[in-house]
Amino acid sequence: MRESFHRKESELSGAASCRTKGKRNARRLGKNRMGSLSNSVPEIKKTLSSPPLRQDEVDRQQYPVKLMQHQEELADQLSHDIHQIITKSLAPATMLQEIAELLGTAFQVDSCYLVPVTDETFDQAITANWCASKYLGLPHPDEIFSTEQLQCASEPTIEDILTIEKSLKTGYQYLPLPIKAVLAIPTRFGGKNNGVISLIQFNPHDWNESEKQLLKAVESSCAIAFSQIAQAEVIASQQKYIAKSAQHESLITQLTILSRSNLELNQMLQLAIASTAECLQADRGMLILLKYIDPLFRTQPKKEIPKARATVIAEWSKDENSRTTQLETLDKSFSVSECGLCQRVFTSGKAVIINENIEQSGISIAPVFALGILPAVLLVPLENQGKVIGFLVLQQAVPRNWDFAELNMVEMICAQMSNAIIQSQTLRQVQMLVDERTAKLQSSLELQAKLHEKMRQYVEQLQELNELKDEFLSNMSDRLRYPLTNMLMSIRNLRLPGIAPERQAKYVDILESECTKEINLINDLLTLQKLDTHQERPQYENIDLNTKIQDVAASFEQKVANKGLSIKVNLPVESLTLQTEIESFNRILQEMFTNASKYSKHDSVVQLQVYHQVEQQIDQVIIKITNTGLSISDEDATYIFDRFRRGKGGRGGGWTPGTGLGLALVKSLVQHLNGAIAVESIPIEDSNLSTICFTLTLPQFSEV
């Protein structure tokens, strides 16, 4: 495509080359090299009157028009190809690399360099650099890039020039030969620079106006590509933050449960340090408690180094045999006065982070820290009422930058551990004081008063948990009692003497039916629990959506026909290919058909509509299941997808049998597939009925 453009351009411009050559040379002599672009002054153009043109001159003027038309076609084709790459590409780096190769080939340059700009910084990890195959494998040149070889495709500002120069210096290290000519343009999206396009020649080259115009034409398309990369980075960062927050919340919950358990203090602390170190991906974790030799230290200045003995009471390390063997041989007890690392906590009054080789500074370090194996240390004090009672230690083999959220969570963990330790120690001290010194009862009561408030809060939380438990057991008992009653009645009737064979068969059928209901209830509960804990990720497969829906609808036609209902399916003319988990998708459709048939008016139609929708660059498949029945009140709609909640009186009418788990299971499965579900009840005029519409939205991952 680019070869044909150059060939046609050269043919059309050959006739006018003599006339334009002198002008081009004069203009080139009058311009500074682009190293001084920031100081250049735009040319002053004067309007001159021209004599009437002869016929041959009129003919010559038609050539640039044809060339311009061809260039517009080429620009449109390049923009179309770039949009295709943006649409189909899944990885940002791959997308930029494909665009760089497309532009480099189209412009017939030696190298094409695309670099994203985010907050005036360059992301080298996603930067794309394409180079012609004949230059691959050559060593990097020692020659330094000169900004005099730079030209801009558009009228540049000083900011644009600085951005282009910085991007070229960033990517110059990847080029095999020195740069001799550069044509560059910054891309703008939302009023800000978001990237730079650089066309590079390893031989001297004079960039013509058509090349500049063509590069300006594709600038907006490349700006969209850079914006896609920026958006993907923001989403990835948010997802990482959410995942880390969920992990931290889970750890806090786990430690809270441990603190409420009946485990002994040392056993609880061992589990706590193991959970903390694993969650924060540390190589080793330790809990160190202090035993003060001087009992009056609590009244001395905080920054004074105390006389105290430090002892490791809980320890965890990654399962590495060589490292574990070395750590097990270390002395687990030391004096605080012999360890400069612990002394830093008392002098600074806050957590200490060590990433450099502190042993070479001459500071004495307790052998238990094993800095030769694990030089990176996070040492956080365990405090009670402003006094240090011990340390939480996290170590790693390589340096680590702890972010604010991680440090904040470690401080929360230390507070929980401090409370647990203080509570345990306080209970022992209170028992000793009661037995030995009745005179100090008042002081112990004051301490108990402080603990009482915490215990009161714990009791309130337990009461809330009990209420939730009672509500759950009440709902479960209703779902279990009815089938079990039918089963017991059938068993008793089967034991009656002289019962007819047909009645025996009937009671056996009842037993089998009710037993199946119980099994289905248990399976649904297990499935819900599995989905709530996110134990497995969806196993996506490509399915023919039209065929799958027709199969499921056909399997329900006989069931709904017995209830006087019919099914109408409205599918796209061209079948859709959906990437989803087949088992979960089947269960969703079955539960939705079952729900629609259960609550539909007699002799009505259950409609299913499927269509494809792309909105704000989000590709989705929409499935709507509509039936006619009693309306759903606004109050019922708020918890219609909750477990064991089916609406008061079964949608305003008589009681309808069921477990109340169907729609709850549907919602969990839809969320498992990264989709969404909603319900809408639209009243029908002059009737007590409504049109009930369940809308299922699933992401469309399959390629177009």
Image (cartoon, rainbow, N blue to C red):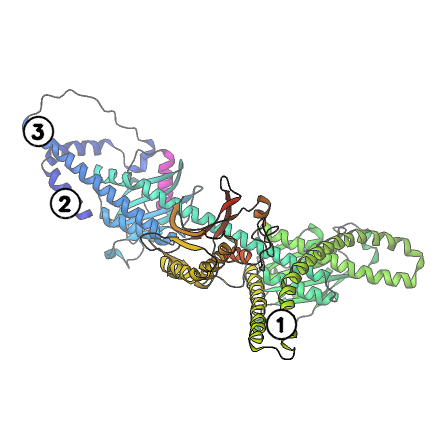
Residue 499 in which image quadrant: bottom right
Tag 1 or tag 3, which sits nearer the N-term? Answer: 3
Mark 3 in CB contact with mark 2 (< 8 angstroms): no
Which amino acid type is shown beneath numbered disc 3?
Answer: Glu
Q: Where is mark 3, residue-wise?
A: 57
Can residue 166 be found in the magenta stretch?
A: yes
Which amino acid type is shown beneath numbered disc 1?
Answer: Ser
For the record, the magenta segment spans 153-168
Q: Is residue 435 visible?
A: yes
Q: Is residue 620 left or right of residue 437?
A: left
Q: Is residue 179 visible?
A: no
The single residue placed furthest to the top in the displayed view is 49
Does residue 335 lie above or below 224 as drawn? below
Foreground: 420 or 312?
420
Could you tell me residue 396's position as x and y percent? Answer: 57, 62
Which amino acid type is shown beneath numbered disc 2?
Answer: Arg
Q: CA distance from mark 3 to mark 2?
A: 23 Å
Q: Where is mark 2, residue-wise?
A: 7
The single residue placed furthest to the left in the displayed view is 55
Tag 2 or tag 3, which sits nearer the N-term? Answer: 2
Q: Where is mark 1, residue-wise?
A: 490
Residue 49 in which image quadrant: top left
Mark 1: give few (<14), some (14-19) or many (20+) Cα within 10 Å.
some
Tag 1 or tag 2, which sits nearer the N-term? Answer: 2
Label 3 SS: helix
